[in-house]
Structure formats: C-alpha cells, structure tokens
Image (spheres, rainbow, N blue to C red):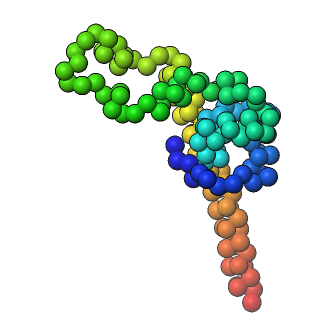
C-alpha cells in the first residue's frame, strides 16, 4: 500500500472523515488506511489519540498477529539452504484462514478506494465536459 500522506499533519476534515468512516460507516482500519493514503499504524494511532478506540486490539479489522508478521524481515522468513528440518517447513505452510481473510479485507479496501477515485474522476470529467460544451455554445453565439 502506498502511503501518500506519510508525515503529513492530520487536517480537521480528515479527522472528521476518519470518525465518520470508523464509527458511522464501520469501515475497517485497512479500508480507512487505503482511503486516507496512510499506514494502518497511523490510522490506529489517530483512532486511539482521538479516543475512538482505547487500544489497538479493539480496532475493527485489525489483527495484531498478522500485523506483527508483516514487520518480520525477509532474512528471517527465508530458510537457509542447509535447513531441511520439518520445523522449518512448517513455518512456510499455507497461510491461515484469518490471514487470508485479512488479505481479502485489504483487497476489498483497495478496490473500494479505486472505486472512490474513479467516481471522483468521473465527476471531474463530467464537469469539464459541461464547461467545455458551455464554452463551445458561447463561442458560437458570439
């Protein structure tokens, strides 16, 4: 996920949108993060600092185990060539169902964000076409 607003200050409008999305629309933290262009961690910090949640564990759609796994370095995840133990192979088994569900939630959030962006583009294009048509009519009548 790209965090286009990383290190940007939160605006009042953005905090109000965050509250609306979390409390009213009941979006997950993943969906909110995608929409705001911020990391899940940034969303969690803001939800907690604004008093919408008292701890990360109660945040809707947040799985701390999956979150912690995503910060494990690639070197730890890659087994050495000499390691052929059964225990090493267990570490690379098929992802668990909750992990798959979190990936599905993230994918749905990204799709939702893309739909939102496409809708905004369509609205902007409609306005531009209307303005262009109005300009053409005005230039003909002059």
Q: Is residue 39 left or right of residue 71?
A: right
Numbered circles on residues, count: 0
Asked if one can make out residue 21 in the rendered structure from this viewpoint, the answer is no
Q: Position of residue 99 (x, y in %)?
A: 51, 22
Q: Position of residue 132 (x, y in %)?
A: 67, 73
Q: Is residue 49 above or below residue 14?
A: above
User: In this view, which residue lies farthest toward the bottom?
Assistant: 142
Figure quadrant of residue 24? top right
Q: Residue at x 67, y 31 (%)?
A: 28
Q: Is residue 72 above or below residue 35?
A: above
Q: Is residue 139 left or right of residue 89?
A: right
Q: Residue at x 58, y 29 (%)?
A: 105
Q: Position of residue 49 (x, y in %)?
A: 75, 39
Figure quadrant of residue 30? top right
Q: Residue at x 28, y 9 (%)?
A: 86
User: Front-most of 21 and 54?
Assistant: 54
User: In this view, which residue lies farthest toward the left?
Assistant: 82
Figure quadrant of residue 51? top right
Q: Is residue 114 left or right of residue 133?
A: left
């Amino acid at each position: 996920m790209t965090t286009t607003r990383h290190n940007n200050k939160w605006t009042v409008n953005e905090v109000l949108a965050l509250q609306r999305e979390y409390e009213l629309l009941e979006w997950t933290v993943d969906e909110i993060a995608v929409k705001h262009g911020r990391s899940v961690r940034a969303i969690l910090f803001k939800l907690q600092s604004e008093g919408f949640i008292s701890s990360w564990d109660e945040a809707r759609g947040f799985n701390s185990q999956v979150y912690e796994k995503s910060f494990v370095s690639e070197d730890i995840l890659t087994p050495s060539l000499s390691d052929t133990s059964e225990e090493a192979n267990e570490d690379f088994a098929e992802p668990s169902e909750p992990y798959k569900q979190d990936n599905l939630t993230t994918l749905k959030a990204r799709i939702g964000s893309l739909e939102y962006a496409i809708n905004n583009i369509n609205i902007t294009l409609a306005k531009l076409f209307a303005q262009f048509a109005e300009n053409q009519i005005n230039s003909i009548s002059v």
